[in-house]
Image (tube, rainbow, N blue to C red):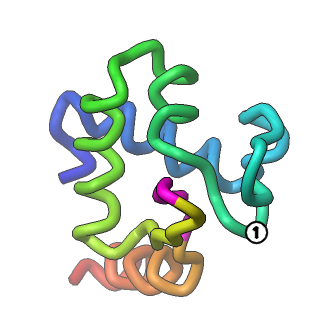
Amino acid sequence: MLRIPAGQRRLDILEWLKDPAAHFPAQRHGDPARDGVTAGTVAHKLGVPRSVAETHLGVLVDIGLLRTKRIRWRTYYRRDEMRIAEVARMFEKGW
C-alpha cells in the first residue's frame, strides 16, 4: 500500500508525524505531539482537499500505522510507534 503512487504522500505524512510540532502549526485544541493533527492540517500541508487527506489518513489508520483520537468534533491523527516498529521488523525479516 505504501508503494503505489499515492504512497509517497503517505510516507510524507508518516515522516511529518514523527515530529508534528516541527511540521505543523499550533492547534486550537489538542497538542500535536501528544494528540496528533487533524485531516485539515495535513491537507493544508499536502496542498490537497481535506477529503484527499482523509483518504490517505484512513489507509494509514486501516493498516495500523496511525491512531485516532476524538477531541470535540474533530479527529486527530498520530503515529502508532509500536505498530510501525512491528511492520519494520517484518520487512527486515523478509515477511
Q: 1 and 73: which one is in front?
A: 73
Q: Is residue 69 above or below residue 53?
A: below
Q: Quadrant of the C terminus?
A: bottom left
Mark 1 secondary-structure assignment: loop
Q: Is residue 91 above or below residue 93?
A: above
Q: Residue furthest top?
A: 47
Residue 78 image position (x, y, % from top left): 57, 63
In the rendered structure, which segment of residues is drawn in magenta? 73-79
Q: Which residue is mark 1?
A: 34
Q: 91 and 22: which one is in front?
A: 22
Residue at 28% over, 39% down: 7
The answer to whether 18 appears left or right of 4 in the picture is: right
Residue 75 image position (x, y, % from top left): 47, 58
Residue 50 image position (x, y, % from top left): 36, 28
Q: Amino acid at mark 1?
A: Arg
Residue at 44% over, 67% down: 66
The answer to whether 73 appears left or right of 55 in the picture is: right
Q: Is residue 89 above or below residue 66?
A: below
User: How many marks can you see?
Assistant: 1
Residue at 73% over, 48% down: 20
Q: Is residue 55 above or below residue 82?
A: above
Residue at 34% over, 75% down: 64
Find residue 41 and report its image quarter. Answer: top right
Q: Is residue 82 magenta?
A: no
The answer to whether 31 appears left or right of 47 in the picture is: right
Q: Callout 1: 10 Å neighbours few (<14), some, many (20+)?
A: few
Q: Main secondary structure of the magenta part?
A: strand
